[in-house]
Image (cartoon, grey):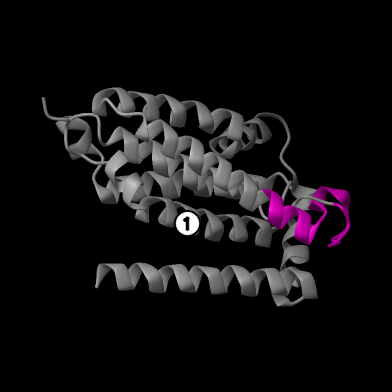
């Protein structure tokens, strides 16, 4: 039953990404909404301290930032389990994430809203938001690995806590991209959808489940 629900969720996410991408490419309703959001934000871009605060929030999805805790926690989990598997999982997830993002960006070629126009197949790299995907996949795995580091961590980082923290960081990363006019609304939504899909696929793999096992090694 649990596997069936997971497959249904994955199928729904794939359909949602496909539908959203088709809308963006065809200039549909959501893409037109993107322009209205951009027009509202453009004359109200933050300055001074408010802008700095939004920039700080955007770091939640900056790959150069989120990769560090991911590799650190994967390394600690690998040491505790006396196995390289957690590190291999982290590296594999990063490679898979990069491939997915690059393929979508190259296929859509959407320009960023800061350019002042909305064009696809124009050599841009706005769709989807890499910050949004990074935040979900990387922080999701960080928390999974963190929860393996002893009983106290396991109790503090239950499933609900992990979901809530990941969602908050993903929201900060994605919404800051929109507020700063770096990404269109649909770029961020696509990033969130792909992030959830990728994280779910990674965590569903048997070797990954072993790597994030809450059980301490014997012996």
The residue at the far left in this view is: 219
Residue 199 position (above or below residue 4): above
Quadrant location of residue 120?
Answer: bottom right
Name the residue nearer the viewer: 88 or 199. Answer: 88
Q: Position of residue 13 (x, y in %)?
A: 50, 68
Identify the residue at horizontal 42%, vertical 24% (top origin): 72
Q: Position of residue 68 (x, y in %)?
A: 50, 26
Label 1 sits on residue = 196
Residue 200 position (above or below residue 28): above
Identify the residue at horizontal 45%, vertical 28% (top origin): 71
Query: Magenta stretch: residue 117 in it?
Result: yes
Quadrant location of residue 173?
Answer: top right
The answer to whether 130 appears left or right of 37 in the picture is left
Segment colored magenta: 102-123
Residue 206 shows in this picture: yes
Q: Where is residue 94 in the image (x, y as percent from the top left)?
A: 54, 40
């Amino acid at each position: 039953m649990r596997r069936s629900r997971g497959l249904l969720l994955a199928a729904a996410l794939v359909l949602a990404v496909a539908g959203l991408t088709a809308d963006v490419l065809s200039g549909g309703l959501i893409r037109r909404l993107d322009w209205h959001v951009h027009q509202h934000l453009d004359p109200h871009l933050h300055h001074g301290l408010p802008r700095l605060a939004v920039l700080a929030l955007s770091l939640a999805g900056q790959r150069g930032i989120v990769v560090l805790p991911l590799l650190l926690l994967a390394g600690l989990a690998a040491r505790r389990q006396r196995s390289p598997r957690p590190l291999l999982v982290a590296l594999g997830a990063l490679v898979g994430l990069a491939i997915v993002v690059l393929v979508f960006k190259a296929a859509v070629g959407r320009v960023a809203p800061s350019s002042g126009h909305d064009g696809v197949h124009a050599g841009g790299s706005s769709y989807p938001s890499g910050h949004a995907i990074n935040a979900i996949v990387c922080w999701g795995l960080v928390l999974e690995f963190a929860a393996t580091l002893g009983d106290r961590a396991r109790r503090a980082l239950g499933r609900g806590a992990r979901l809530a923290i990941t969602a908050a960081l993903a929201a900060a990363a994605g919404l800051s991209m929109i507020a700063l006019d770096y990404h269109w609304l649909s770029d961020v939504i696509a990033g969130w959808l792909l992030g959830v899909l990728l994280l779910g696929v990674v965590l569903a793999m048997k070797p990954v489940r072993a790597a994030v096992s809450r059980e301490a090694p014997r012996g």
